[in-house]
Amino acid sequence: MTDPNAFDRVSPAESGNWQASWETEDNYWFENFSSRPYALGPDYYDRFRPAFRYGFESARHSLGRRWDDAEPDLEAGWERYEHRGEAPSAWDEIKQAVRDAWERVTAGSTPGAESRKPQVRE
């Protein structure tokens, strides 16, 4: 049996197609944001958008690395991330959004990722 959510997984993009890949991810998270436990409401997507982008970009460069191993480096890197926005959130506020985007990219490529992958509401 095939996975009905397989179309939701991110495929690694060629460098020239990166922007299109992020636009696809941005659309996905915009549509699914309100179902996440940290969502404060649909109007708060812009606050979490940089976190989704950071998780997406970071995971693409770290395929094969587990979240628990990468998280300390990601936390340190968040302070230097160029797309944090004008009023950047603290790591503790956005960590779960970064992790959701990270695991969406790495699903199936890290040990145990399948059991941690974000669930899509029907």
Image (cartoon, helix red, strand yellow):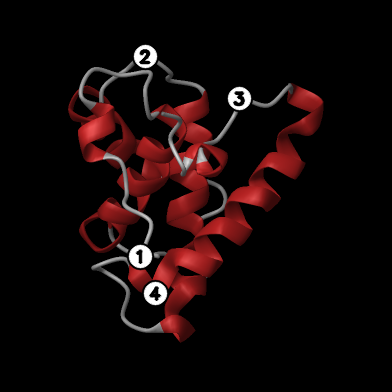
Q: Residue at x 32, y 48 (%)?
A: 118
Q: Amino acid at mark 4?
A: Ser
**In the depicted structure, whether residue 16 falls above or below residue 30:** above
Question: Residue beneath label 1, please?
Answer: 89
Q: Seen in the image, is 96 located left or right of residue 4?
A: left
Alpha carbon distance from label 2 to label 1: 27 Å
Question: Residue beneath label 3, please?
Answer: 12
Q: Amino acid at mark 2?
A: Gly
Q: Seen in the image, is 119 located left or right of residue 44?
A: left
Q: Amino acid at mark 1?
A: Ser
**Which residue ends up furthest to the right in the rendered image?**
16
Which mark sits nearer the N-terminus, 4 or 1? 4
**In the depicted structure, whether residue 105 falls above or below residue 90:** above
The answer to whether any part of residue 87 appears in the image is no
Q: Nearer the viewer, residue 27 or 82?
A: 27
Disc 1 secondary structure class: loop
Where is the N terminus found, in terms of image quarters?
A: top left
Which mark sits nearer the N-terminus, 2 or 3? 3
Disc 4 secondary structure class: helix
Q: Position of residue 75 (x, y in %)?
A: 28, 41
Q: Residue at x 54, y 67 (%)?
A: 30
Q: Position of residue 120 (x, y in %)?
A: 38, 56
Q: Seen in the image, is 59 located left or right of residue 73?
A: right
Question: Residue beneath label 4, please?
Answer: 34
Question: Residue beneath label 2, please?
Answer: 64
Foreground tag (1 vs 3): 3
Foreground tag (4 vs 1): 4
